[in-house]
Image: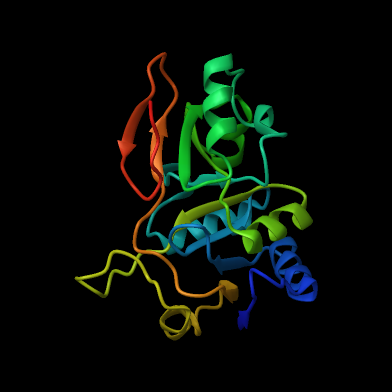
Amino acid sequence: MLVEINEINIDNRLISQAVQILNDGGILIFPTDTVYAMGCDLYNKKALNQLASMKGERLSKVNFSILCHDLKHLSDYVKPIDRSTFKLLKQNTPGPFTFILNANNEVPKLFDTKKKEIGIRIPANKIISAVIESLGRPIATTSLHNEEDTLLDYFTDPYQIYERFENNNNIGMIIDGGMGRLEASTVVDCTQDEFTIVRQGLGQIDL
């Protein structure tokens, strides 16, 4: 199902439909402030396994990030952070960044893994932000790669995404939020005393 949602004038009925799909264990494809992504309810193990399968991996091997609405529930997933780390996050969220933080004991339970780190993302896209806020909990997510195009790393056109995934029964909804970008988020490692950029993407940051 392909639905068009205008970020400037969001139709809350469509947001509610998206949330219902997540509650039912479905997977969404959606815009962010960088590339298009796909994700599911962080607390639905069946959906997490399906999302991992779509990446060709077992859940324990996939590096999903967690999409949050804000920083309020950060402590639910990461170990206590110091003042400088919190300041960095506060100044650059929402925005095109993924921050790698030290995971607490909740993360291994969610992903059936021994992971000690987790990527946290708070995108500046009102559509997916509204979905997460309405859901009331984060979304596990991964970028939507276009393996069939040697020139493009990511899908940018929602209609091409629809043509690629319309017959995939795991996808409950594809949200057309306009053309996506080709640049992914900038990944910043905050697990050590000194912050480092792991991947330079769309976000510009002064460390």
Residue depicted at 74% across the width and 61% down the height: 23
Quarter of the image where the N terminus is located: bottom right
Q: Is residue 201 above or below residue 71?
A: below
Q: Nearer the viewer, residue 41 or 44?
A: 41
Q: Is residue 19 above or below residue 133?
A: below
Q: Nearer the viewer, residue 125 or 73?
A: 125
Residue depicted at 71% across the width and 59% down the height: 130
Q: How many marks?
A: 0
Quarter of the image where the C terminus is located: top left
Left of 112 or right of it: where is 146? left
Residue 14, percent from left and from top: 74, 75
Q: Is residue 82 visible?
A: no
Left of 199 or right of it: where is 73? right
Left of 150 or right of it: where is 65? right
Q: Is residue 180 above or below residue 82?
A: below
Residue 113, percent from left and from top: 49, 35
Residue depicted at 56% across the width and 59% down the height: 39
Q: Is residue 45 visible?
A: yes
Residue depicted at 75% across the width and 73% down the height: 17
Colouring style: rainbow
